Amino acid sequence: MGRLANKIAIVTGGASGMGEMMVKRFVEEGATVIAADINEANLEKIKGEHITAVKLDVSSDESWKQAIDTVIEKFGRIDILINNAGISSEKTADQITAKDWELMHKINGFGPFLGIKHVAPYMKEAKQGAIVNISSYTALVGMGMNAYTSSKGSVRATSRAAAAELGGFNVRVNAIFPGTIETPMTQALTDAKEQMAMLVRATPMQRLGKPEEVANAALFLASDEASYITGAELVIDGGYSAR
């Protein structure tokens, strides 16, 4: 039996990048996975025998409600929630507008909060559950005075608060802090090639991370192997933050 046998898992941003890798890894370990994403074309590509595709705008309270209602109606429970969906930006502090800030926080910060808000009641009732929120190493090392760093810092704070509040219900909440990972999102940062090269040089392991390395960490935290781990912060950055 797999490490997630008979588990029902939701992965936001599950149709591409790290999220897609998590979906596939979880299925390999026996889970039935709901890939939740706003990109309908990518959802069509990823859905399969053990993968249910659900359209989700993580910044929308109503969209979350509809998605969770769909999952509960079909499967009756939710064992695992991975709050992975997010966006990035190349804009520097002097370029950021109020709209930029609001959008980044609506998706990266408010999104995970909404996920917990809508899923936690079912987990509390079942007296079990695992939530993994994807933050960023930028929330740990003060890198970049920008909306992305701020939004990922909010994920860190929300994770700790949720872990404290939900622990008594046997619902675990942990956070992962990836470094720069090879995904479509990082490849799209075309104007930041020099910065990317500097990041690699400053990383002790001298390379970017791989989506499967983050997926394996999420798998561990979502599994029963991590049954006494909550409020933890797992950094996957090749040693960058240890410098």
Image: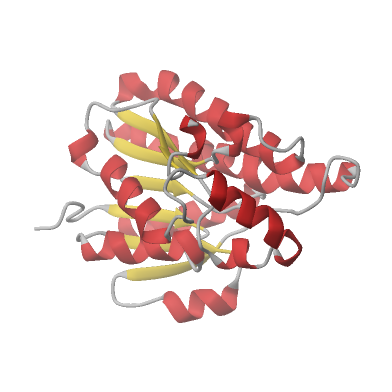
Is 137 situated left or right of 127 in this image?
right
Foreground residue among 11 and 231: 231
Foreground residue among 20 and 164: 20
* Residue 104 picture location, percent across and down: 73, 46
Instruction: Reply above or below: 33 against 45.
Output: above
Quarter of the view holding residue 220: top left
Residue at 61% in and 67% down? 187
Most extreme residue toward the front is: 201
Is 127 situated left or right of 118 in this image?
left
Residue at 47% in and 81% down? 45
Check the picture and name the quadrant holding the N terminus. Answer: bottom left
- Mark yes or no: residue 35 visible: yes
Foreground residue among 75 and 179: 179
Instruction: Please tell me how many numbered marks the rendered image carries.
Output: 0
Is 4 situated left or right of 119 in this image?
left
Most extreme residue toward the left is: 1
* Residue 3 picture location, percent across and down: 17, 52
Residue at 43% in and 76% down? 46
* Residue 60 picture location, percent across and down: 67, 50
Instruction: Reply above or below: 127 against 10.
Output: above
- Mark yes or no: residue 87 visible: no
* Residue 183 picture location, percent across and down: 53, 64
Quarter of the view holding residue 127: top left
- Name the image colouring: secondary structure
